[in-house]
Image: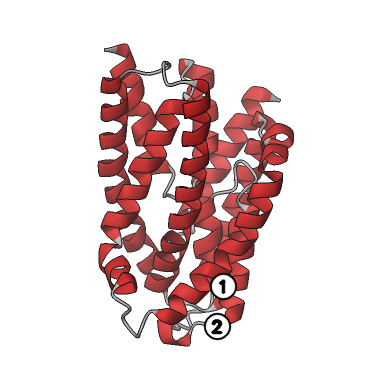
Amino acid sequence: MTELIEAVLLGLLQGVVDPMPVSSSGHLVLLQHFFGIEQRLTLSVFLHFGNLLAIILVFRRDIKEIFSFNPRYPRLVKYIIIGILPVGTVGFILKPFFDRVFATTIIVGFMLLVTGLVLFTSKYAANKGRDMEEMQLKDAVIVGLAQMLALFPGLSRSGMTIVSGLHSGLDRRLAVKYSFLMSVPVVLAATSLELIEVIQTGTGDVGVNMIITGTITAVISGFAAIKLLQHIVERQSLFFFAYYCWMLGSAILAIFL
């Protein structure tokens, strides 16, 4: 039963916290400190897969249109490809360096404060409301660089990309859609690399029940979290997450400094 509770907690962490602009790494630090829960590699693969399924379910119509070669979507597809180049290149080459040098509790705490600052600026984003047909190369570059910066533990990927999209002048609904569709190949690549490592090192660290429980929890909670985030961004209330990030970052720094 303890392992199932652990699977549910980690599934919720992946499903709810990861899509939200509050950095899952900060919450994992606190789970490890107060409950001794660490995300095991095998379970991590399936939780990321559950998160990927949640994104696909929410944006299934857009994904269907992309693969149906809808003439409205080639521009979006082109900018998704351009947007993932920075994080793909830097992540592939320097991810071990980031994990080794920057994945400390202190860095996570400081970066959460930075995430809060970025989120707070969303209230000042110009509401130009440009749609898919009006997307430009600079939008992909700006959002892509923001996603690359989110390699730093404690910087929220969704927060960085959505806010940068808003500042770039994208429609609020499009900023969320672009952020998550751009994450699909990134999450897929990261999950594949983790799966290769699991195959090489073995899968004996978790049971089947734990995997199923965690994955289902991640899919259901992730779907709900993304839908809620869409509503929050459209209501122009994203900056409220800044206060949460500041409190969480301050708590981590107070505990571990």
Marks 2 and 1 in Cβ contact (< 8 Å): yes
Name which residue lies at 52% across and 79% down.
169
Measured as percent of width and height from the top left, residue 31 is found at 48, 24
Q: Residues within 10 Å of mark 1 (few under 14, many from 20)?
A: many
Measured as percent of width and height from the top left, residue 241 is found at 47, 51
Of 162 and 117, nearer the camera is 162
Q: Residue furthest top?
A: 1
Of 245 and 193, nearer the camera is 193
**Which residue in the protein does label 1 denote?**
140
**Which residue in the protein does label 2 denote?**
136
Amino acid type of the residue tagged 2 in the rendering: Gln
Measured as percent of width and height from the top left, residue 1 is found at 26, 12
Name which residue lies at 33% across and 41% down.
50
Tell me the element at label 1.
helix
Of 142 and 105, nearer the camera is 142
Say whether residue 38 is left or right of residue 12: right
- The mark found on residue 40 in the picture is none
Say whether residue 145 is left or right of residue 228: right
